[in-house]
Image (tube, helix red, strand yellow):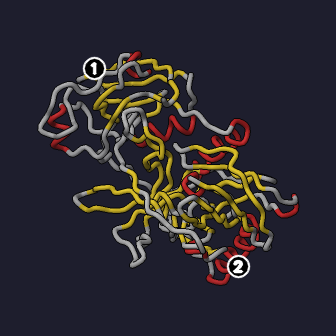
Amino acid sequence: MNKKKLLVASLIVVLVLTACRFSFNLPGMSSGANSSPTPVEEAESTGAVTPLVPTQAAFVPLTPLDLGERDVLLTTLYNAVSPGVVSILVTTADGGGVGSGFVYQTGYVVTNYHVVEGETALEIDFPSGYKARGTVVGSDLDSDLAVIKVDAPDEVFVPLTMGNSDSIAVGQTVVAIGNPFRLSGTMTVGIVSAKGRTLDSLRQSESGNFFTAGDIIQTDASINPGNSGGPLLNLNGEVVGVNRAIRTTGTTATGDPVNSGIGFAISGNIVKRVVPVLIEKGSYDYPYLGITSREDLTLDMIETLGLARQTGAYVTSVASGSPADKAGIIGGVTATSFPGLPFGGDLIIAVDGKPIHTFSEMLSYLIANKSPGDKIEVTVLRGTEEKEVTITLGQRP
């Protein structure tokens, strides 16, 4: 059965399906449900989000593609890319399921970690009809990525081209290809709905809280159980993301989540950064600050905290002995009327000269560009005083 996470937003309980492996019963197999909490650690809540003064930009209407041209574009893309998208049949001690993946290079397939989590055997089915055994050679719970080495002839593999996920824009058309509900080779089309989102990592800290995955792409391309691990593509047929999760408010009669147009994909640039290391070493180390923050501060919260500006990542706490602690970053110390939001913390407003508007933005920058041991220059507001702090990043414990 798929794994679900419960999140609370504006008093509405929603489900984030991070285990989009479509579960099913095989002879002698049973399916089970797993759930995981969503607390956040290492700044893995988020920073203050506030409206900015809008800048006016000229709007130039685009000439829409002729319907026939659009059809040719999408069918050409599908015919070129779909041979590199595979179905992953997973056997576990508790049952089995099917997820998606794609050929990263000859001999290697990329998918989500949660697709292969707990696997005792893997079968990789190619669109050509060829079937092969697979072995997980690297996994990363923070980004929810895994690499499978597949024993098959070279000619079976059709590697997909990786694109630059930083270059995609909100509103841009994207395509998802995968195996929802075991319907192999399914293609759906949507747009990039937002960039720079965060999701919970699948890895817990020593305190029991979960780290955070950053640089997540939000899309309304239809993603359902079984789509996990499949590629999100631009119209050039380049992989700009790996489909990971959906957010939904309901489930079907069988307990499967209902797609509501909110899907999430690991950015392609994170994939390009992590996967080669997984192939070489089997694991990947993320940079670590050791702070906790909070997203979506209201005006009442901002006024209570006495913040000199509305945007930035407000530090609610600092882990003892962490890189941020050693560098002198200060977390909140005095309780306020808002639970979990103490007064007196630093407000991070820039990293390496890059303005920071939210904690999500800061986290995405660090994950996509930095490694343990790197030094960063952090600009903080402490009261009304601006300070520059040098931090040597650690490794997530």
Residue 65 numbered tag: none
Question: Residue 69's x, y, as percent?
Answer: 67, 79
Horizontal side of 169 relative to 251 (left or right) equals: right
Horizontal side of 65 relative to 314 (left or right) equals: right
- Amino acid on which the number 1 mark rests in the picture: Glu
- Amino acid on which the number 2 mark rests in the picture: Val
Looking at marks 2 and 1 on the same chain, the residue that comes earlier in the sequence is marked by 2
The residue located at (35%, 71%) in the rendering is 250
How busy is the neighbourhood of tag 1: few (under 14 within 10 Å), some, or many (20 plus)? few
Dot 1 lies on which element?
strand
The residue located at (43%, 64%) in the rendering is 262
Query: Would you name the residue on which mark 1 appears?
Result: 385
The residue located at (30%, 40%) in the rendering is 294
Horizontal side of 18 relative to 83 (left or right) equals: left
Q: Quadrant of residue 131?
A: bottom right
How far apart marks 2 and 1 lie (CA) works out to: 58 Å
For the image, the number of numbered tags is 2
Query: Would you name the residue on which mark 2 appears?
Result: 72
Horizontal side of 154 relative to 186 (left or right) equals: right
Q: Give the vertical position of 320 relative to 8 (above or below).
A: above
Question: Residue 380's x, y, as percent?
Answer: 35, 25
